[in-house]
Amino acid sequence: MAEYIEFDKNHHDHHHKETFITKYIFSQDHKMIAKQYLFTGVFFMGIIGILMSILMRMQIAWPEQPNIIFDFILGKWAPEGVMDADIYLALVTMHGTIMVFFVLTAGLSGTFSNLLIPLQLGARDMASGFLNMLAYWLFFISTVLMVSSIFVEAGPAAAGWTIYPPLSALELAQPGSGLGMTLWLVSMAFFIASSLLGSLNYIVTVINLRTKGMSLTRMPLTIWAFFVTAIIGVISFPVLLSAALLLIMDRSFGTSFFLSDIFIQGEVLHYQGGSPVLFEHLFWFLGHPEVYIVLLPALGIASEVIATHARKPIFGYKAMIISILAIAFLSTIVWGHHMFITGMNPFLGSVFTFTTLLIAIPSAVKAFNYITTLWKGNIQFNPPMLFAIGFVSTFITGGLTGIILGDSALDINVHDTYFVVAHFHLVMGISALYGMLAGMYHWFPLMFGKMMNKNLGYIHFWVTAISAYGVFFPMHFIGMAGLPRRYYSNTNFPLFDDLADTNQIITMFAILGASVQLVFLYNFIYSMFYGKKAPQNPWKSTTLEWTASQKQIHGNWQGKIPQVFRWPYDYSKPGYKEDFVPQHMPLKKGEEEY
Amino acid sequence: MTSIFVILILIFISISLWQMIKIFDLSKAISGVKIDDSQIANDKDNSTQAKLMLAFLAFIYAITIFSIVKYGKFPLISNAASEHGDKIDTLMIWTLVLIFIVQIITQFLLYYFSFKYKGRKDSKALFYTDNHKLELMWTIIPAIVLTGFITYGLLTWSDVMNLQKENDPMVVELYAQQFNWKARYAGDDNVLGKSNVRLIDIDRANILGLDENDPNAQDDVITTELHLPVNRPILFVMRSQDVIHSAYMPHFRAQMNCVPGMVTKFSFTPTVTTKEMRENPSMIDKVININNIREEKSKELARSGEEPLDPYQFDYLLLCNKICGKSHYNMQMKIIVETEEEFSNWYKNQTLFKNSLIAQN
């Protein structure tokens, strides 16, 4: 308690001295940092990442044809409007890197963990505002480095977002593995440092700064998801850092951690005794948990949004927590399913098949619990709810094909085909995107005190939903037809000529889906300034963030921090007139918590 | 110039959109209709969106049926050309059946519930927090189903990956480099000569780095086409000289990475010759279809004064399926499966390694 009071004092002293720089730039207020992540991570990097995917799709649909758009955007990398093959690979790489790390890791967690952890727990701020600020600025440096790598002479990194050596280690293997790859590695080093600082801060805040009465089993599922995400991040990101450092050594100081017996462009290189497979192990030890670092926050947001807008408690609250923990645990022991056919021992492949398919069980529990939550609800179709339902839909569709890819015997034939691309885009790309958008629509009133236009929200959702299925559903089938991913053009294989029209349809859906995001962007920015003023608790939600001061003060609550008496999902509880009972309302005499 | 033009058009479109929305709002305000501008869903929204939910369910089903009808014919789940391929295909079909059943049911429940339980101002949701029986049910049922699939999958996997299952396989090396493939046959002794990239000697045409003093290397044969005798087990030994490549032979349900610094292995028995596969009715259909597409394209090319495309004839292929650099998309090798007799006729005409070296002074 004493700590709280002291913190209060600090906050009051601090509050009066805020200048433009301390408020908007080097801010230590978690709400402002959340917005900083939102604008750098999601909007800025998101626009670049989506634009890259459209360029790629246009190349696949209309290969090797002069294109005015290529000429305009790519300039010298598209001589006479025809995209260069190296640049296609660079686009593949940078799209993956930007989307996975910058948009869906830093953007998603950075925005919502920062915004919601203190507000939903009843804390004045993160455990360390300074570390939080530092984390953002390290992320900012990482963003600047990554974006600047796009502009180097030989082009950015082009070895795929998994940057397997030797391709990523040798400039002789491809031009992107020169300065572009160096910048990629340095940028990721900053990124990991930022992610670790951020995650530690989240963990410490959740453990120490919960308000009175906020026991672990009274935390909203969002917080559970952010908490577990941060733990997975702290466990797995350092391994990627070590892999990146060893790769830097191989590249620049002549060591042979990952390289051996190489003859390239007419010369034998000195490397001996290293193994690229070692790098793959280190990379995927992060790479797979990373999928859940992306997905879990979206699961948490969907839980919260579905319960609130269905006006119904989330079904199986404790089962949801257990399945988050189970998914998190399993996610750290399945990485080998990315490596079934790398020459890894087949017996090891069997073990990874086993652990991988186990993940389907907690995932199934989650999906069924969401569906049961909707059953006999009183569903209010606000835009966030649409995205949350869309999330459950793509999570199921994308998750199911994981049963094929996780099965080593079946993976032999669909590995690295478009089947994989379709699978992970649905289950982690689109799902996480839906979770993120659900969160943005839901907490926009909290962040900016304004409402977003619902009709534009409806248009945004339905066009996005149709495009998402239009892009990725047929893509499974062209993968099953054996079309490898990361091909600049398929015209050298008459075998695949009958897939060309499908590729064009996919591209058209992709362009449609990308364009409709502009409606969202317009809605977001317009509403920020001219939106209708939001009421204190627009969605009639039970959680604490809606009791905070609407004035966005540093410290969140003007007076005392509310105390918590009940779990976060008392929607439509019998015995109450309103269909929600906020967490800070004491239990009635004889009332059971749930 | 065009770029500025495009940007200007985009800006004008967004401005007009913004203005139209404003006019729309204003006209509503002027007409005196009381509008609900709380931006929170009301019963009318709920009912519209609920109907759209149902429509979207229909869309998902439609796109599923459309995809199966349109693409169901050519996926790689039929006409495997190797012995183990059929086993993988059967497993694939069972898995697909499971996936489609679960997908159809769960999506139905999701969207149907969304439709049925749309919000109404005067109604209230059911306070229903927990049901251990239900939760146990959907933990245990997936667990049982998955146990079945895991067991089935692992049995198939250990069968496919068991390199010792066949006696006396023919040993063939697949050698990858940016951006082409070579095959090396072990010769009469069926033992590949020792090799290392450090022994590569371009001047002597020793391109695969074979040990010239190794007796086993003398009768090795290096080719740029992969000929395989039908019904004979083949053991592939894979190497790469520069970056990681992946030897993908989709018709044989076979894939393995080629990793510099190590040797990887895969084994299969081809069962259908190239000739037989060309006469397969579904392959004939596919080839006709592809040739129609190519003819259309050729006409287009002819109009712009370019060379027409060659007609397509089916061949097995070895593709590179791991990103390996600029020409990754064109790294392929033709595979020809033929009878034992045809194979030995072809093999006789190949040059042995010892004879392929260029003498140096």
Image (spheres, coloured by chain):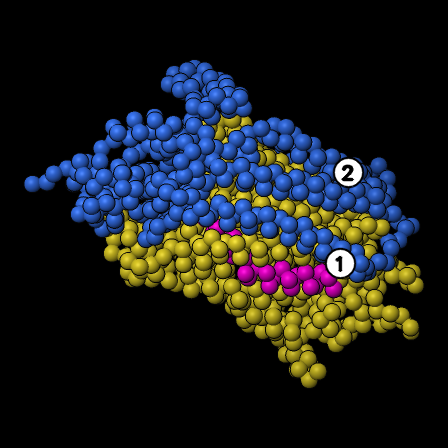
| Chain whose colour in the figure is yellow | A
Q: Do we see residue A539 in this rendering?
A: no
Q: Position of residue A298 (x, y in %)?
A: 65, 55
Which residue corresponds to the image point at 46% horizontal and 17% vertical from the top-left? B295
Residue B49: quadrant of the picture = top right
Residue A287 appears left or right of B108:
left
User: What is the quadrant of residue A231 in the picture?
Assistant: bottom right
> Residue A304 at x, y = what percent?
73, 58
Mark-to-mark CA distance, 1 and 2? 29 Å
Of the 4 image quadrants, the one containing the N terminus of chain A is: bottom right
What is the magenta range?
Answer: A318-341
Q: Nearer the viewer, residue B35 or B164?
A: B164
Compare residues A166 and A214 and report the one nearer the observer: A166
Q: Is residue A195 above or below residue B287?
A: below
Amino acid residing under circle 1: Leu
Give the letter of the chain under mark 2.
B
Q: Position of residue A181 (x, y in %)?
A: 38, 53
Residue B54 shows which numbered tag?
Answer: 2
Q: Is residue A323 magenta?
A: yes
Local packing at callout 2 (Cα closer than 10 Å; few below 14, some 14-19, many 20+) is some
Q: Are marks 1 and 2 on the same chain?
A: yes
Could you say which chain is coloured blue in the image?
Answer: B
**Which chain does the numbered disc 1 sit on?**
B
Quarter holding the C terminus of chain A?
bottom right
Q: Is residue A23 above or below residue B340?
A: below
Q: Is residue A529 or residue A322 the one in the foreground? A: A322
- Residue wearing tag 1: B136
Residue B182: x and y, percent?
A: 31, 38
Q: Residue at x 34, y 26 (%)?
A: B342
